[in-house]
Image: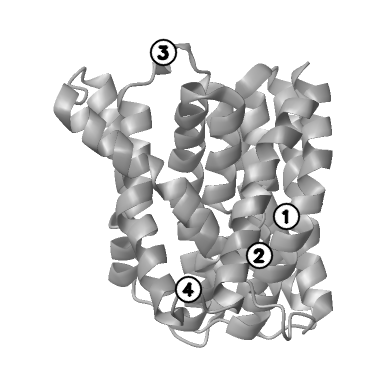
Amino acid sequence: MIAQSLVALGPVIGLIALGYGLRARTVLAPAFWPPAERLCYFVLLPALFISGTATADLGGLPIALMAPILAGSVLLAASGLVLAQRRLDLDGPAFTSVLQGGIRFNNYLGLSIALALFGADGVALAAIANTVLVPLVNILCTLAFARYGAERLTVGGTVRSIATNPLILGCVIGLLLNVTGVGLPPGVDGFVRTLGTASLPLGLLCVGAALELRGMGRNLGAVALASMVKFAVLPGLGVAGCLLLGLTGPPAATVILFLSLPTASSAYVMARALGGDSRLMASTITLQTLAGVAYLPLVFLVIGRVTG
């Protein structure tokens, strides 16, 4: 398991490094990357979720065990940060970036590793993790911006941003196609699956292109706090949940993996748009992504021991 995991990590690291190199050397115009990321987020990644969940054998997956471990871990970690907020030497916008850095996760990394480890089942397991985590994380982060951000969100705007999230819609559509037995017609299935396959390499290239090495040392205390939650508290809660509920095998590995992932580059866009500390968010994303590449082998070691 550990050797297989390390092999799976190789292409991920390579694509991130290539994306950074392409951006740094301006092989592609800087204007290329924002539309490419939007293409992944709004079209390609939802297509992967639809294809993966619409055709998966969900009956054999322990969704009833995975969901409470995933949701419970994030809720406990977020609640701890909110309770500690008054004692932290952080203003409101900075706190929103710490919260995002603590509970948001990079879909492209998780999906790439899950697919490499478990094949088609990995896509289905990752889709379950996303169906639970994406709505929950977006709700918590949106509420945090409404309370602590420089901008104030309306209730209607909060609900609309969650209901129209393309990743949530992709998961829901795929699940509905699966449970109703409708599935995807042969011609449509190939089209959607091909679209989804393009999401991971392009998404990882965008992750690398988003790295900002200059100035990433700003406010290291806040970055360290977010990273402690991300790399220690959340995985620890996930491991405890798996042991407590008896979740093992690939489902347990997927739960621990997704709770261990570095924060997503989309957190910067959200911080800039909704009144967070975008400079702190950029430092957190860069440092967590770089640290996560070195940290994930340790996660694979823990997964190997927990899942047997």
SS state under label 2:
helix
Q: Which residue is mark 4?
A: 270
Mark 1 or mark 3: whose residue is earlier in sequence? 3
Task: Tell me which corner region of the image, top left, top right, bottom left or bottom right, holds residue 267.
Answer: bottom right
Q: Amino acid at mark 3?
A: Gly
Mark 4 or mark 1: whose residue is earlier in sequence? 1
Q: Is residue 171 above or below residue 81?
A: above
Q: Is residue 212 above or below residue 40?
A: below
Q: Amino acid at mark 1?
A: Lys
Dot 2 and dot 1 residues touching (CB under 8 Å): yes
Dot 2 and dot 3 residues touching (CB under 8 Å): no
Question: Residue visible at 45% across and 55% down?
Answer: 202
Q: Which residue is mark 1?
A: 230
Q: Which residue is mark 2?
A: 101
Q: Amino acid at mark 2?
A: Gly
Mark 2 or mark 3: whose residue is earlier in sequence? 3
Q: Which residue is mark 3?
A: 59
